[in-house]
Image: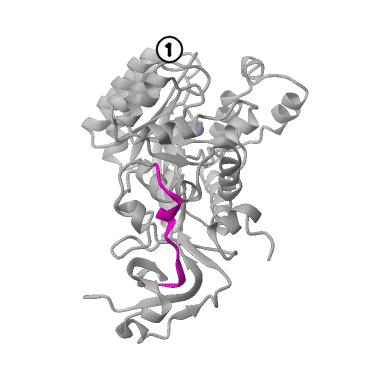
Amino acid sequence: MRGVKTWAVLKGAARLYTNERMVERAGGRFNLSDLAPIEDGAIVYSLRKVRGKEIPGEILWSGETKKIPKKFLKTRKQRDLKQKACLIPGLIDAHTHLVFAGDRSDEFIARMGGVTYDELAKKGGGIQASVRATRAVTESELFRIAKRRVTVIAALGVRGIEMKSGYGLDRATEFKQLRVMKRIEETFPEFYFRRTYMGAHAVPPGSSADAWINEICTEILPEIKARDLAHDVDIFVDDGYFDVSHATKLAEAAQRLGLGFRMHADELGNTGAAEAAAKNSALSADHLLKISRAGIAALAGSITVATLLPGTAYFLREPHAPARDLLDAGVRVAIASDFNPGSCPSFDLPMILQMAAVNYRMNSAELLASVTLSAAQAMGMKDTLGALIPGRRALFTEINALSFEGWLYTLGRWS
Ligand SMILES: [Zn+2]
């Protein structure tokens, strides 16, 4: 309260989910009782002004409506949900490729006819098709596209978004994507954005994997750091793309500069990528459709979050990642959309969470954590985001249901 001049009260939540118990526990395997919803809950949060916009600052208090300390009730900024909606920590999508141009619905039509992703890539489709479109578009048009997407995503309740470059593969276009991300961040100060440089999404035409990783490490990353263009660095380690030696080299270069490191790992085949992610203290290892027992054990002994992307497995008609095995081994699991033009054109995180609920055998505490607290950890923000407790940033989502499970069940689209 000290130094706080303005604050707001949001009360009368049918249930308030703070994630407090899950904050106190290590690992990602939670019990149903860890949800610990508060009936008729309320939050109090500070307000701050950013470029004329008044936005939530940090959580000052959370608990039962009837226990709100009197000093916090001395404000006119109060809203009552009248027990018709619930409050959860703001949803976080910890893996998107938000900033790209072009449309690959032609590939979707071909795939419906039985053509594989590999066959399309060999004909100049796949990532290369999005690279051509993203290179061709102007920076202001790319910003307009991304801004429209963020507006729709926010309406779904998402309050934190990780976004990657990787559809330029040359310095100029990758930097154009990263500058657009910075502008997005400035345009929506009420949300949290994590900017990731993913020049190592594929080998640029005319180059080799070794030469490109070398150029990234020695020339591009120092410039990214100097211009504060990205928080983290990502690499696609898989059959036909980059290998674990490239990942190790990139991780060392990134971490020397104080940048976070994450990996697309073991999606198309098993190349020991999860083990490399663990060894290099990656923030997250993402996909993991083909992770081995050894990979699961390596992640269990590390700080790395397993970020699973059920929308991608669905869209590619692949078997799902072994979520239960990961959780039972003690790995922290996040669920994200992987929104991208090729393998998951949806950014509907609630729908993707429902896919996880149907396919992953996770309980509702694990599911809620996967898109809030664990997703915050995957973004390098485990002590700042993902819970509605004092001191944390006030990112919250109102869900149109009487419980978290009720919302997940109906996706909040009726009632
Ligand atoms: Zn991805």
Residue at figure coordinates x 62%, y 17% from the top left: 118
Front-lying residue, 48 or 43: 43
Q: Can residue 171 be seen in this view?
A: no
Whether residue 39 is in magenta: the answer is yes
Residue at figure coordinates x 71%, y 30% from the top left: 108
Q: What stretch is highlighted in magenta?
A: 29-44
Tell me if residue 235 comes above or below residue 370 in the rendering.
Answer: above
Residue at figure coordinates x 58%, y 33% from the top left: 312
Residue holding disc 1: 208
Q: Is residue 274 visible?
A: yes
Q: Picture coordinates of residue 62 (x, y %)?
A: 36, 70
Residue 101 shown left or right of residue 212 in the figure: right
Whether residue 360 is in magenta: the answer is no
Q: Picture coordinates of residue 99 (x, y %)?
A: 52, 41
Residue at figure coordinates x 50%, y 71% from the top left: 13
Q: Quadrant of the C terminus?
A: bottom right
